[in-house]
């Protein structure tokens, strides 16, 4: 019986994770959960799943949840890190949204946990720091939850990186893959939230519309699989049934296919290398009929190009880019700025990235993150 700590329990990944755990009560127990503000949904989950430990990032929400359940509730970043390092926890599934997920991941690594990682920003912000922490804590290990990285993980199946020619990360292309660039200035929030395939949280849905999410995934793949950026490609695949591919040096191209259901990669991340039954949709190739693939348009999707450039520059560039994007996406969702203000603003802020010498430490990264947020707010 594995004790699971679920960070981000009220989001879409959290809901899918609970769906997986319910199918395997003999294998998993939901021991601890955390979320930001939605204390009512947390109370519902806690009662239904008999959860022992809870944390709300928002202190006021923590007080409400404690009052509702009549038990102590942790709060803030200290609370998240305490849950992630709890001695009773076996697996930490981190599906927190944004940079808030970084420190809990580090806490879990330092406590030698198995981390099922769905928080892109952990590796985008602090990939080098995470790698160093894993090297210092060899009993800790990561399994990726994102469908693309989970697909690559399955295709590699623990093969050495020297056998890999390139990684090919698939992208749906979002709702604007067929829109001409001149129409991008007219994109409304409602348009950008209308994803053609996946049902996700608002922030990641906007990142999908701008294709920033693919840029973040390229950076994440670089650190997860230790593959140079020059060997990582993005290919647009509107049907979203081929979740990513690995080209091996012998000419073999391995792909992982499946229905667009996040329960599949979540369960793989929890149980690898074992495969156990899962009640979910099966992919019927005859019904799908045709798969199409094409290169992304980097003029239309400037965020993707920016992320790839920042990854190659390394240093603080990815942390600055990520922070600026988070703030600008939120401003777009609040209808304070236009869609094209996201890539334009990110580019302006990235140009001011300070140079660093020597190894990065987390404090330096967090300072750069905070400064980029201040600049983004000023720009808005």
Image (cartoon, grey):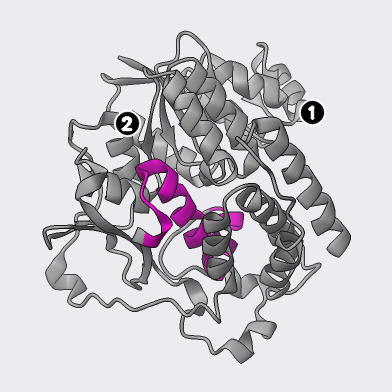
Q: Is residue 9 visible?
A: no
User: Is 216 a magenta residue?
Assistant: yes
**Quadrant position of residue 23:** top left
Q: Which quarter shows the N terminus?
A: top left
Label the magenta part by its dominant secondary structure.
Answer: helix
Identify the mark at residue 60; answer none if there is no mark. Answer: 1
**Residue numbers of the magenta segment:** 201-230
Q: Is residue 6 above or below residue 74?
A: below
Q: Front-most of 339 and 252? A: 252
Q: Is residue 377 above or below residue 160?
A: below
Q: Is residue 62 visible?
A: yes
Query: Closer to the camera: disc 2 or disc 1?
Result: 2
The percent position of residue 268, horizontal first and vertical second, equals 27, 38
Label 2 and label 1: CA atoms lie apart by: 32 Å
Q: Label 2's element?
A: helix
**Which of the marked residues, 2 or 1, is nearer the chain's N terminus?**
1
Residue on which the image places disc 2: 270
């Amino acid at each position: 019986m594995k004790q699971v700590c679920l960070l981000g329990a009220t989001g879409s990944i959290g809901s899918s994770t609970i769906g997986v755990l319910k199918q395997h009560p003999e294998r998993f127990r939901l021991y601890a959960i955390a979320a930001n503000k939605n204390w009512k949904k947390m109370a519902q989950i806690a009662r239904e799943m008999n959860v022992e430990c809870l944390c709300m990032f928002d202190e006021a929400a923590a007080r409400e949840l404690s009052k509702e359940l009549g038990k102590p509730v942790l709060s803030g970043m200290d609370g998240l890190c305490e849950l992630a390092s709890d001695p009773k926890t076996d697996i930490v599934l981190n599906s927190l949204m944004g940079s808030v997920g970084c420190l809990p991941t580090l806490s879990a690594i330092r406590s030698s946990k198995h981390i099922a990682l769905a928080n892109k920003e952990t590796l985008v912000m602090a990939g080098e720091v995470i790698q160093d922490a894993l090297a210092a804590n060899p009993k800790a290990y990561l399994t990726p939850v994102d469908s693309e990285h989970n697909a690559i993980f399955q295709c590699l199946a623990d093969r050495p990186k020297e056998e890999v020619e390139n990684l090919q990360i698939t992208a749906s292309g979002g709702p604007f893959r067929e829109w001409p660039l001149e129409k991008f200035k007219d994109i409304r929030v409602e348009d950008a939230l209308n994803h053609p395939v996946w049902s996700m949280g608002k922030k990641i849905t906007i990142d999908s519309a701008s294709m920033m999410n693919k840029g973040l995934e390229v950076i994440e793949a670089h650190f997860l699989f230790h593959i140079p950026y020059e060997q990582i490609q993005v290919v647009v695949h509107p049907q979203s049934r081929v979740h990513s591919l690995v080209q091996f040096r012998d000419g073999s191209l391995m792909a992982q296919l499946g229905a667009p259901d996040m329960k599949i990669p979540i369960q793989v991340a929890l149980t690898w290398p074992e495969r156990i039954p899962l009640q979910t949709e099966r992919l019927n190739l005859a019904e799908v009929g045709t798969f199409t693939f094409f290169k992304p348009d980097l003029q239309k999707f400037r965020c993707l190009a920016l992320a790839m450039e920042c990854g190659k520059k390394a240093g603080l560039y990815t942390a600055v880019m990520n922070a600026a994007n988070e703030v600008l996406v939120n401003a777009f969702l609040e209808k304070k700025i236009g869609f094209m203000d996201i890539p334009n603003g990110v580019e302006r802020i990235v140009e001011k990235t300070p140079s660093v010498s020597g190894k990065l430490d987390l404090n330096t990264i967090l300072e750069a993150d905070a400064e980029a947020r201040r600049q983004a707010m000023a720009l808005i």
